[in-house]
Image (cartoon, rainbow, N blue to C red):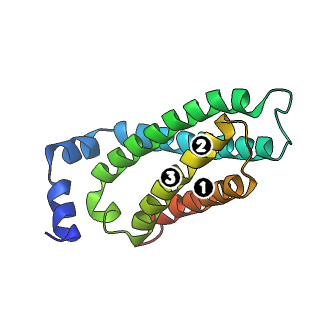
C-alpha cells in the first residue's frame, strides 16, 4: 500500500470525517499544538540558559531541571496527540507532505536528544553543545510546522 493510498483510506474513515465535520476540533487541536510547541521551545530555551548559568542559578541544576523536564514530557505528549488529530483531519494533504515527514523525523530526533540532556541535567551536569543543538532543532521544527501550510 502506498502512502497516497493509505492517506486516501484514512481520509474516508469515520474518525477523519467526524473531525472534519466538527466545527471546533481542528481549531482546538491547532491551538493546543501551537501552545505546546511554544512551551517546549521556551522550556528548551530556559534549559539552555540554565545550562550556561544565565538563569535559575540559585538552585542546583538537578533540582531546577526536574520539574521543567517533567512538564516538557507532558507538552511533547500533547504535541504528538494534537499532531495526530491534525493529520487525521487532512491525511491526504499531511501524510504526503515531505515537510511533515521531515518534521516528524526532527521531532523524534529532538525527543531522542532530550533524553541524554535530561539525564545530564538531572545528574547536575551541564551539556552546553547538546542543549544548544536541541534548541536549534526545535527552531527548525517550528519553521517546518509553519512551512507545512504553504508547501504542496
Q: Which residue is mark 3?
A: 112
Upstream in the sequence, badge 2 or badge 1? 2
Residue 18 visible, this angle = yes
Q: Which residue is mark 2?
A: 40
In-front residue for pair 49/60? 60
Nearest to viewer (mark 2 / mark 3): 3
Residue 125 position within the rendered picture, expressed as x and y whole percent measured from the top left: 73, 42
Above or below, 145 against 19 in this view is below
For the residue labelled by badge 3, is the local secondary structure a helix, a strand or a loop?
helix
Upstream in the sequence, badge 3 or badge 1? 3
Circles 2 and 3 in contact, beta carbons < 8 Å: no
Upstream in the sequence, badge 2 or badge 3? 2
Pick the quarter of the image with the N terminus: bottom left
Pick the quarter of the image with the C terminus: bottom left
Write the residue at 86% across / 27% down: 58
Q: Which residue is mark 1?
A: 138
Say whether residue 34 is left or right of residue 52.
left
Residue 90 position within the rendered picture, expressed as x and y whole percent measured from the top left: 30, 56
Say whether residue 131 is left or right of residue 100.
right
Q: Alpha-carbon neighbours of circle 2 within 10 Å: few (<14), some, or many (≥20)?
A: many
Circles 2 and 1 in contact, beta carbons < 8 Å: yes
Amino acid at each position: 500500500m502506498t502512502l497516497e493510498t493509505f492517506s486516501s483510506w484514512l481520509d474516508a474513515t469515520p474518525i477523519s470525517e467526524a473531525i472534519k465535520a466538527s466545527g471546533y476540533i481542528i481549531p482546538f487541536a491547532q491551538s493546543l499544538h501551537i501552545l505546546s510547541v511554544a512551551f517546549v521551545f521556551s522550556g528548551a530555551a530556559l534549559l539552555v540558559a540554565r545550562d550556561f548559568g544565565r538563569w535559575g542559578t540559585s538552585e542546583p541544576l538537578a533540582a531546577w531541571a526536574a520539574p521543567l523536564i517533567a512538564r516538557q514530557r507532558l507538552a511533547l505528549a500533547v504535541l504528538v496527540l494534537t499532531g495526530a488529530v491534525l493529520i487525521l483531519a487532512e491525511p491526504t494533504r499531511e501524510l504526503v507532505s515531505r515537510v511533515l515527514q521531515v518534521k516528524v523525523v526532527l521531532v523524534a530526533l529532538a525527543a531522542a536528544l532530550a533524553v541524554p540532556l535530561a539525564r545530564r541535567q538531572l545528574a547536575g551536569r551541564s551539556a552546553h553543545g547538546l542543549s544548544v543543538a536541541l534548541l536549534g532543532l526545535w527552531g527548525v521544527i517550528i519553521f517546518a510546522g509553519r512551512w507545512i501550510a504553504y508547501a504542496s
